[in-house]
Image (cartoon, rainbow, N blue to C red):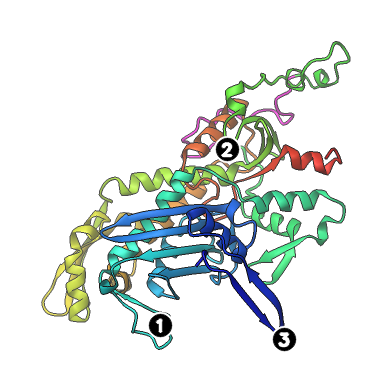
Amino acid sequence: FPAVRFTLAGSDRSTLELPATGGTPEGRLARIAQVMGADFPDNAIAIDAMRDGVHLAGHVSIPSYTRANALQQYAYVNGRPVRDKLIAGAIRGAFADVLPRDRHAVTVLFLSLDPATVDVNVHPAKADVRFRDPGLVRGLIVGAIREAMAGAGIRAATTGAAGMMAAFRPGAASYSHPGPANGHRSYEAAFRASGSSFDHGSTLARSPQRPLDMGEARPARGFAENDQAAFDTGPLASADARAGIAEPAEALLGTVLGAARAQVHENYIVAQTRDSLIIVDQHAAHERLVYEALKNALHSRAVPSQMLLLPEIVDLAEEDAERLAMHSETLAKFGLGLERFGPGAVAVRETPSMLGETNVQQLVRDLADEIADNDTVETLKERLDRIAATMACHGSVRSGRLLKAEEMNALLRQMEATPGSGTCNHGRPTYIELKLADIERLFGRR
């Protein structure tokens, strides 16, 4: 209720005062910042969507701005605060591809719908609600969040730059931030931990799947064909000219990720924009690009299936068997062929080839539970997406691959054009941005 001023005082606490901010979208975001913290607006995406009489508004964090638990996920239905499993599940589904499993998005969502289509009397504390059309509500939340993230383009969390600033200053090891397990840990330790899983040695072998033309490996000394050129004491020239790198076009400096200037430690691309320095983890970034390409191929056509030698009969409750039969056409698109087999049973004749040998009984029961809870078939899709993620990890540019300038710039342009490329498919950031003003403060120029 951003139009209302709140004051909370007591003998056992300091006074909390939240001034009214107004009922406009800007006022709502200002109130959210009062509660969630001043850095939330800079790391938030606005949500505003409508479907079949249900309106969803609010803000969600960008994928690289997360928390160790879901306590900062707030949801309101017709102004009533709720802790609803369907809404929480929809938020998890919307962020499934971009967050680690032990991290959670920060969200404030407001649902408005006809009171006759929602039952608020299913929980003594009114914390849970029951929607007449749960599939509609879940689909609206998932679709609106994903569409908003795609429309927001690629963004890096401001907390990454703050961590880098702290790491550069004397006594950097004392800087800490909330970690998923132990509360706090040093930024440097967190940075090493997040990057360690991408260190696959210094192999220069080509990847079997290469959306980019990676070309042949460069010499270890990088772009400079003649190292002595960097120490030329003749007439002054630009650093790029001395290093043998072409002066970047002005248009590249105006892009989100700028122009590639160097590759350091055979894994990190250093780029420049007009007002910032960008550091990109080449393996994490390309992993996301390959993953999105695999997903698009996977979901744009029917998934290849494998015929079972003998049909697998799965005994279920009658209502579960009926739900699966109703969704059989959708399941067939994912390569799972099933049909009714008498009362309380289904016969599975085909399974997705990508899954290989799988526990058909457990797969079908999990699907039945998923459909019963949310009236969707997300379980199978998530399994296929996880396989695509594994393939992407093995098919992406490895740490230790030396890249040419044009290859690095091609990677940056693909990142800008790919939704969700601010994080890899393990949820780790793919790049960090440090503003020129921050760099100048490090050197005492501001």
| Outermost residue to the left | 342
**Disc on the earlier residue, 2 or 1:** 1
**Disc on the earlier residue, 3 or 1:** 3
Q: Are marks 3 and 1 in contact (CB under 8 Å)?
A: no
Mark 3 to mark 2 CA distance (whole Å): 67 Å
Quadrant (top left/top right/bottom left/bottom right) for the C terminus: top right
Main SS of the magenta part reads loop
- Residue denoted by label 2: 205
Q: Amino acid at mark 3?
A: Ser
Identify the disc placed on residue 154.
none
Residue 351 position within the rendered picture, expressed as x and y whole percent measured from the top left? 27, 60
Q: Would residue 219 be counted in the magenta stretch?
A: yes
Q: Secondary structure at mark 2?
A: loop
- Residue denoted by label 1: 126
Q: Is residue 428 found left or right of 323 in the rendered image?
A: right
Q: Would residue 28 be counted in the magenta stretch?
A: no
Identify the disc placed on residue 11.
3
Q: Secondary structure at mark 1?
A: loop
Name the image quarter holding residue 29.
bottom right
Q: Residues within 10 Å of mark 1 (few under 14, many from 20)?
A: some
